[in-house]
Image (cartoon, helix red, strand yellow):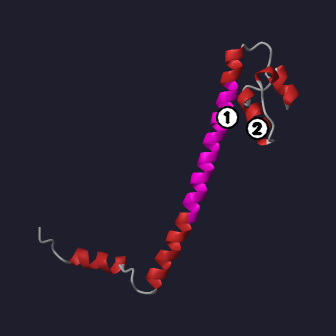
């Protein structure tokens, strides 16, 4: 991957930031010297920062998704337990609300 990055010859769909992210995933570091010589220092630093930011965003998204799953399953378990115990009776309340006239 390091050689591909240094040459800078990657398909447009993939891009240099994708290559940098893959290197980060392997646990390696990327320095500005690892990027193609046709880029100036500012562009190299930008690409490294962008790849790191994208990786951080992806990590946050994964954490949020796993939290949704954990809390969602916990909520569903509680809801099922309440329904089994007869405490949760939203269907009955909905039927009563439809038959009674509103005092307002």
Q: How many marks?
A: 2
* x 64%, y 36%: residue: 54
Q: Residue at x 33, y 81 (%)?
A: 92
Identify the residue under disc 1. Answer: 52
Of residues 16 and 63, the one drawn nearer to the viewer in this rendering: 63
Above or below for 82 versus 33: below
Residue 2's label in the rendered image is: none
- Residue behind mark 2: 24
Q: Tag 1, which secondary structure?
A: helix
Q: Mark 1 or mark 2, which has the lower sequence index?
A: 2
Residue 9 visible within the image: no
Q: Which residue: 55% across, 59% down?
A: 68
Mark 1–mark 2 CB contact (< 8 Å): yes
Residue found farthest to the bottom: 85
| Residue 6 rendering spot, x and y as whole percentages | 83, 22
Q: Is residue 104 magenta?
A: no
Towards the viewer: 104 or 5: 5
Residue at horizontal 58 percent and vertical 54 percent from the top: 65
Answer few, some or many: residues within 10 Å of disc 2's Cα (few below 14, many 20 plus, some between 14 and 19). Answer: some
Instruction: Read off the magenta span.
Output: 47-70
Within 10 Å of the Cα at label 1, are there few (<14), some (14-19), or many (20+) other Cα atoms?
A: some
Q: Quadrant of residue 57?
A: top right
Above or below, 57 relative to 74? above
């Amino acid at each position: 991957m390091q050689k591909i990055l240094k040459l800078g010859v990657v398909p447009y769909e993939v891009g240099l930031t994708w290559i940098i992210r893959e290197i980060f995933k392997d646990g390696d570091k990327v320095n500005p010297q690892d990027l193609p010589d046709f880029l100036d220092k500012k562009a190299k630093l930008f690409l490294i920062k962008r790849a790191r930011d994208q990786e951080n965003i992806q990590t946050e998204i994964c954490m949020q998704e796993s939290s949704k799953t954990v809390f969602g399953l916990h909520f569903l378990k509680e809801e099922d337990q309440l329904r089994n115990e007869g405490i949760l009776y939203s269907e009955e309340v909905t039927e009563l609300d439809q038959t009674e006239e509103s005092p307002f």
